[in-house]
Image: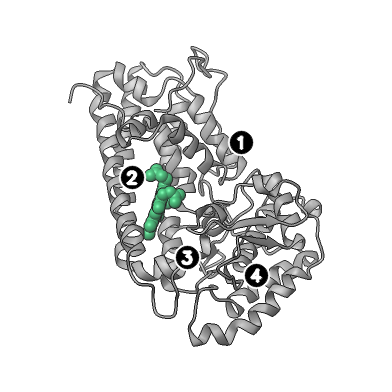
Amino acid sequence: MSHVLPRLSAVEGDESSQRSPQGVENKFRPEEFGVHPQSGFFPPQPLQKLPDAFGTWEQLLADARSCLTLNNDCSEEAAAKRPKGELWRNGVRDMPILSVEDLTENTQLQRAHMVLAWILHFFIHSMPQSQEDSQVHVPQSLAIPLVEVSKVLRIAPVATFADTILWNYELIDPILPLTPQNIKYDNLFSGTETERQFYMVSALVELKGTEMLKIFEDFYNLRDYTAPSAVEKIAVDLVQLKKIVGALAEIFRLILTTLDPSIFYWKVRPWWVGAKNTLKKMQWIFDGVPNSAVLDVGGGSAGQSSAMHALDIFLDIDHKLDAERSGRSLQADLSLVERIRQYMPGKHREYLEHMTSIRPTVRDVAQSIPTLVEPYNEAVLALKALRDLHIRTVTLYVASQSRSTPSAGLVLEV
Ligand code: HEM
């Protein structure tokens, strides 16, 4: 291959370089953006439970699974649980309004967001609704602290990828570090193995993704891209990146063997849904919060994984071309990406914005150095294969299921 592949998808940046010609001032330091050298976007240790003063929140989360079912679940088991569910929701309504001001550490704020966001989704999606309802009220005991902590962390006030994957993991052996072999998920909405495996696959993708972050950091910290040693390093790293993306695809394939499409679509996904994602538009009113209609309440998705967005930015994938090919407007496409990023912790979003602003990109460098063309193109093709696999997964687990009959006991959403 003699030329760099047309862009799969590069956010066109401005001309201003963040890097001085010698590259001296612009050291790229992921730690400044809350990105850990070993655990990447994960906190290096599982988040500890909140202090006793916030014990009510922790207790409600711990009790939720045994009391609640989806509001459209008509099974006998669900019917038997309903009285307990009403008591649980009354417990949420009756909580004192606690301020998160007393939580001084970032990891405590993350845990508070995670606990409150999970309570929010448990609360809303378990609450019986009638056909006529177009609004659901989030009681102020939950709404006020959740919005407060979301503002501090600069993240949407709903259960995001961070809440279900990054801040929700536990270690199998607490003495050992976070590795693919030593991670587990016990806090679940549906309690199904399919939900657990979705979190596991997402976490394994994210953990493998930390290897890419080191490659990005090394590239952005190169002083002179044209120096023979730098060119050699970039070539080696691009080959390695291709291998990592290939390994991500292998991990991704686990979805097909470990997740049941029907259970995923009917029993798991509804718990993650936010106000803006439902077929029936249901407005979420956050009582006690001014202007709550403007909050980002789209719900959680693995599309909010910062590692996957960072890969797109590093390879300079062109959303302009993506938009043109699919008939969407560029504005719509870029604003979709920007909207998705509101569901990431603010620091992680800044990490991505910082990456986007750095020039030259690896694509620019590959275009000017012939020996880098092939390794660059190979890495892009590996990403294309991963995306194709993702689209096939979406078809199987979402599009096809939306035309299927719900699992036993569930009624169709209206
Ligand atoms: C059963 C498995 C999965 C299904 C059904 C699925 C479904 C979807 C859907 C419907 C979207 C569109 C937008 C949205 O809802 O946010 C999306 C976007 C996305 N998903 Fe997944 N997903 C799955 C697994 C994963 C995993 C494990 C990852 C990686 C951690 C991932 C990464 C992404 C990314 C980065 C996007 C953003 C848009 C893009 O770049 O194409 N997905 N996914």
Q: Earlier in the sequence, mark 3 or mark 4?
A: 4
Give SS at disc 2. helix
Using the rendered image of the protein, determine whether residue 128 is visible from the camera's viewpoint: yes
Asked whether 169 or 160 is in front, the reply is: 160
Q: Which residue is mark 1?
A: 32
Q: Is residue 247 left or right of residue 308?
A: left
Q: Disc 4, ligand 1: is the CB inside 8 Å? A: no
Q: Secondary structure at mark 1?
A: helix
Question: Where does label 4 land, which residue?
Answer: 61
User: Residue visible at 61% across and 48% down?
Assistant: 156
Q: What amino acid is at disc 1?
A: Glu
Pointer 3 with pointer 4, Cβ within 8 A = no
Kind of residue at disc 3: Val
**Residue found at the very far left of the displayed protein:** 1
Marks 3 & 2, CB-CB < 8 Å contact: no
Disc 3 marks which residue? 414
Q: Earlier in the sequence, mark 2 or mark 4?
A: 4
Between tags 1 and 3, which lies in front? Answer: 3
Say the numbered circle drawn on residue 393: none
Viewer-nearest of discs 4 and 1: 4
- Three-letter amino acid code at disc 4? Leu
Secondary structure found at label 4 = helix
Mark 3 and mark 1 in contact (Cβ < 8 Å)? no
Of badges 2 and 4, the one in the foreground is 4
In this picture, residue 328 sits left or right of residue 413: left
Upstream in the sequence, badge 1 or badge 3? 1
For the residue marked with disc 2, what is the amino acid? Ile
Asked if 331 appears above or below 245 in the picture, the reply is: above
